[in-house]
Amino acid sequence: MIKKLAISCAVSLAAAASVTLTSSCNHRDLCYDHSHWLELDVNFDWSAQPDAHPITMVLYLFPTDGDKPLRYEFADINGSVIRVPAGNFDAVVFNGSTQTVVENGTTFRDFTLSTDNEHILAPMSREIISDPPRYETTRDQPVKAAPDPVWSDKKEGITIAASRAGQSLTFTPVEATATYTVILTGVKNLSHAIGLSASLSTMSESFSPATQSHTGNEVTVPLPISMTDATTASGTVALFGHCPVTPLREHILTVYTSDMHYYNFDVTSQIHDAPDPRRITISIDGIVLPEPDGTGMKPTVNGWLEDVNCDIDMN
């Protein structure tokens, strides 16, 4: 079977090149063809994540002498043969062809995966008259888009020896993001006429493949909420993690409606005490939404209204 591999190579004092490699009996050499470049068999072992569904895989080789990194993107998520220069490297891998994940940094230690800025009401997909209020203690946090699911691995101290055939690397990617599900139950006046979305504060801005941990600043992430039955609404997103800065911080879930009402809930304990830090469920029961006016919008309302439901059980 012919395997295809899209590669971007960056080497010291050389411009980055982007080409497509076809691995078979004959293939094109990449960047430079001389005696110090050789074939390397790269394999991705999915035994730790059999349910993973990446589209492509990305490999970064970081020369330990500080030279520019080499980037390879694999169309075959099980791996392929690539051309590499002899030398010493550290390496990271993660899934590519994502819609929201952004690659940052040029060294093994400072390389991170993050997301772009996002409007806090972006998931609502309805026209909103004005920006909504933010909770007082977290309102200055940047608002970042939720990432696509990420799987990653790393290796340090790799030596690619010159003129040695049959060299290979095997990576075992594991889940780098966590899944957060928000469930609103017992919702009164729930209707398709009213649009909903939410935001979650004090999340991690980025992920470091070198340390295999979340990192960066504290950010607020918007997330979609949709009606699932007459009294229930829910939404699920992947996130890098929470509380990148110690000690542990508070987390505020804010639910917004398209007719400019909002509801704040302290969900800190639900996040910090979750039995599985990779599968976190936040449950809110008994929200009383405003009665719909048939359009889901109330243009005559000047400003947002905070509705307080003192009897809501968040456990």
Image (tube, grey):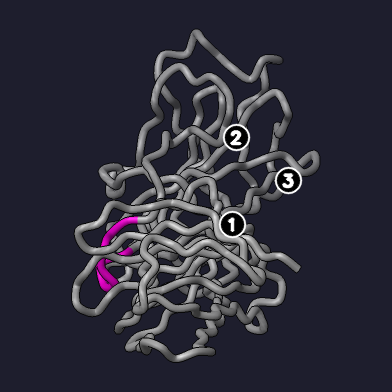
Sequence-wise first label, 2 or 1: 2
Q: CA distance from mark 3 to mark 1?
A: 15 Å
Q: Secondary structure at mark 1?
A: loop
Between label 3 and label 1, give the one nearer the viewer: 3
Outermost residue on the top side: it is 300
Q: Which mark is residue 48?
A: none
Q: CA distance from mark 3 to mark 2?
A: 12 Å
Which residue has dot 2 on it? 196
Tell me which secondary structure the magenta stretch mostly adopts: loop
Specify the quadrant that holds the N terminus.
bottom right
Which residue has dot 1 on it? 313
Q: Residue at x 44, y 62 (%)?
A: 30
Quadrant housing residue 215: bottom left
Give, as a three-letter code, the residue at label 2.
Leu
User: Magenta span covers which residues?
Assistant: 104-111
Cβ atoms at labels 2 and 1 below 8 Å apart: no
Q: CA distance from mark 2 to mark 1?
A: 20 Å
Which residue has dot 3 on it? 232
Can residue 285 be seen in the rendering of this structure?
A: no
Q: Is residue 33 above or below residue 86?
A: above
